[in-house]
Amino acid sequence: MAHGTRHLAGGRPAGRVGRTRLLVFLAVLGPGLISAAADNDAGGITTWSVIGSRYGYGMLWLLLLITPILAVTQEMGARMGAVTGKGLAALIREQFSLRMTAFAMLALLVANFGTTIAEFSGVAAAFSLANLPSWVVVPPVAFGVWILVTRGNYRRVERVFLALTAVYAAYVIAGLLAGPDWGAAVHGAFVPRVHTSSLWLLTAIAAIGTTITPWGQFFIQAYIVDKRISITRYAYTRVEVYLGALFTDVIDLFIVVACAATLWKSGIVVQTAQDAARALEPVAGRAAELLFGFGLLNVSILGAAVLPLTTAYAVCEAFGLESGLDRDWSEAPAFNGILTAFIAVPALVAVIPGLPLVKVMLLSQDVNGVLLPVILIYVLRIINDRRVMGEHVNGRFHNAVAWAFSIALMGLSVTLVLSPLVFGS
């Protein structure tokens, strides 16, 4: 044995084993990080900007609470994909009645439709920084997205856009340069403050709905299946899923901190894209609007491409309909119809004159938050079925976190409905 070379019990050099594990990890890299990063879409960036500008550091505790829940829910979807080799919609169809399947798909359609409107609202908001009206820019962008999805390699483009969204690393720098009150930030992260106003409840639901999305459950499982990650390599994917959840919420943390240290400190609440851009002034100065607009446009186009495609595949998978980008209208009419409608109609909504774009993006995340428990209940029923998952069913920790979260979110939604009657506005 050469000096300096450690061997394992099986006789293989430790260095070679380490390199092999790294190569395996790199081979399965993608689903966790991409799915989690995609949560920071137009609605996500806008929601956390509004939170930072409206409540300062006071809602950081909610972000701290959401992070492990995001990790748990994403991990469940990834594990189901690795064990079964099937998408979530297919499993729902197999395990539930047609009526229950239709109900799940209705929830997904409503949530995704609202989120896609938010993506095109993000496109409009980005171009509003250049004083370009939405009716001029949104239709050609929508047509470009349709061409991209139906004629291009959207998976390759998706990675390019995600790389470009690294512009939001500027929030980390802005948050540091703005001189935030870190004592207040720590206090806001570890000392929960709950309000009973409808506005606060709406904001809290939006924060949850923009971070843990209904479509995200379908997306990550489909990604695992598409990448053909088996349960034998799943240990590496689990690590990546957890890292992805942490990465996403660290960015959200600095969005809140940057907005709290600049906008909230100055008494400015985000109402427009111009307001949100001001949080980047410590790092970009007068170019803050350009930097923010560039990033917002990228994540909006990414979401506008991914969401319709995810929706079309899920619905067709759930009802056993033909699907696929390689099939024309005569072969897959439902797939192509849903895909086209989910690009065209939200784009038309986004060009309504005088539409409050920031409020639309925030409201869409509320819809996500309200409908999320519906999807999670299906997920929990399936992932605890040993006939489907075998020995890979949920443990007590995952079940406790997911069920407690689902019940709490439903309770939050009920409280929101009753709050004007019980607490007043």
Image (tube, rainbow, N blue to C red):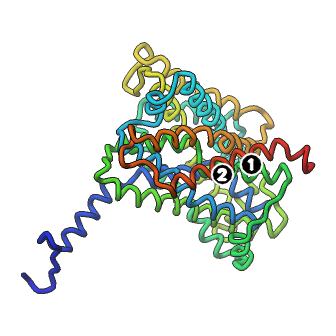
Q: Residues within 10 Å of mark 2 (few under 14, many from 20)?
A: many
- Horizontal and vertical percent position of residue 78: 43, 48
The quarter of the picture where residue 322 lies is top left
- Horizontal and vertical percent position of residue 67: 58, 60
Q: Residues within 10 Å of mark 1 (few under 14, many from 20)?
A: some
Residue 43 seen in this snapshot = no
* 131 or 147, nearer to the observer: 147
Q: For the residues carrying marks 2 and 1, which lies nearer the camera in this image?
A: 1
Residue visible at 64% across and 75% down? 176
Number of numbered labels in the structure image: 2
Residue placed farthest to the left in the image?
A: 1
* 110 or 377, nearer to the observer: 377
| Amino acid on which disc 1 is placed | Leu
Residue assigned mark 2:
208
| Amino acid on which disc 2 is placed | Ile
Residue visible at 46% across and 62% down? 243
- Horizontal and vertical percent position of residue 130: 69, 48
Tell me the quadrant of the picture where the N terminus can be found. bottom left
Residue assigned mark 1:
412
Relative vertical location of residue 422 with respect to residue 321 in this rendering, above or below:
below
